[in-house]
Amino acid sequence: MNDQPTTPPPGHNPYFQHPVPQGPPPQGPPVMMHTAPLPVQRRPRRAGLAATVVATAVVVGAVAGVGGAAAYSALDEPTSSSTSNAGSSTSQVVDTPDSPAPDGSVEQVAAKVLPSVVKINVSGAEGSGSGSGIILSSDGEILTNNHVAEVAGDGGTLSVDFNDGTSAKASIVGTDPLTDTAVIKAEGVSGLTPATIGKSSDLRVGQGVVAIGSPFGLDSTVTSGIVSALDRPVDVGSDGQGNSTTYPAIQTDAAINPGNSGGALVDLDGNVVGINASIRTASTSQGEAGSIGLGFAIPMDEVMPVIDQMRNGETPTHARLGISVADVAGQNGAQVTEGAQVEEVSAGSTADKAGLTKGDVVTKVDDHLITGADSLVATIRSYRPGDQVTVTYEQGGETKTVTLTLDSDAAASNS
């Protein structure tokens, strides 16, 4: 895994395929997917997530058409019978007991969570597509990805398809590009089933999880797998100010495909622990690739404060150190190391007051090891403004530790 894709210029994401070409695809409805300002700003020499053996990318927005599916039905086949000297036998139809699903089974999880997950249809000036959403309140507040909602843009439209077959128009309540989250509101609805929000911090690698959403526009789709990694730094692009959307993702091998974006990743108790947001996909010369067993979800613990701010009509805020960083390249002082190398320190920031300077290498935040720029960004993203953290860094060949209070980006155009 030695490929290191170059960092996109501000406002450009090389992994982003716009959700909608003009006009509908040849067969079926178009479908939008995410496969996938900042606490730490990164410089162009930062390396992104490494590619796999085949060329891969973290897909943060794409559209796929649902074509005709080949179908097989035994009812369409002529019936036949056979005989032999030993006689013949006939299959029998027996009643299957209608036993309840066992606790902790995927069947039981699906029954609990499906009423709380919706399909979101979105259209705007540049086209149309679809994604998924999670019901937050009985009167229609719905959580989804920013890259799903933003397709509507100014003057676009949103509608929601519920699990019971009903639908409603919707409007945007709030968006946060930095965490790739958004809240929308379905109009004229009541009595919906809100999802139960769990704690992503309780997850363990190897634990069973279930993904629910609308891949390729196929609503109410359930897939299952395990948590294959935690705190995976996933970088899915940057805004016009150079601030990146990087989060400490839950990695899963549950099949996640275009259209799953904004849907629920739940534990086997049916509690939402993540928002399906991006996928690692093999490059393909023909259209959009699907799941290869590497999907990423935004952990709920980290984004619930931001979601609550949007629901309350507030502008989301994020923690910041006040530095720009890059991956460590080559030798630092007397030893080769890995971490996030400071490229610039904002005057008056918490990092500046703590004594960090250009050239320092941040190697740890509290107990989190920092392996590169994305790792530091994702780690700081998991905190809130005002939190105290202990930062370990190398300066002039010496290892230093400082405890500081994280700034807020409320009054800053970048981090």
Image (cartoon, rainbow, N blue to C red):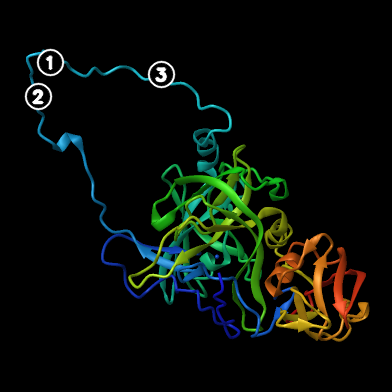
CB within 8 Å, label 1 to label 3: no
Q: Residue at x 55, y 65 (%)?
A: 36
The kind of residue on which mark 2 rests is Ser
Disc 3/disc 2 C-alpha distance (Å)? 29 Å
Residue 260, above or below 340: above
Residue at x 51% of width, y 65% of height? 148
Numbered circle sitting on residue 97: 3
Q: Quadrant of the N terminus?
A: bottom right
Q: Residue at x 9, y 24 (%)?
A: 81
Q: Position of residue 238 (x, y in %)?
A: 61, 77
Q: Position of residue 203 (x, y in %)?
A: 68, 46
Comes first in the chain, label 1 or label 2: 2
Q: Earlier in the sequence, mark 1 or mark 3?
A: 1
- Mark 1–mark 2 distance (CA, rounded to whole Å): 9 Å
Looking at the rendered structure, the kind of residue marked 3 is: Pro
Contact between labelled residues 2 and 3, with CB atoms less than 8 Å apart: no
Count residues near mark 2 (Cα–Cα under 10 Å), then give few for <14, some for 14-19, many for 20+.
Answer: few
Quick check: can you spot residue 359?
yes
Dot 3: what SS? loop
* Residue placed under numbered mark 1 in the picture: 88
Depth check, front residue: 393 or 217: 393
Please give the residue where the numbered disc 2 appears in the rendered image.
81
Give whichever of discs 3 and 2 has the lower sequence position: 2
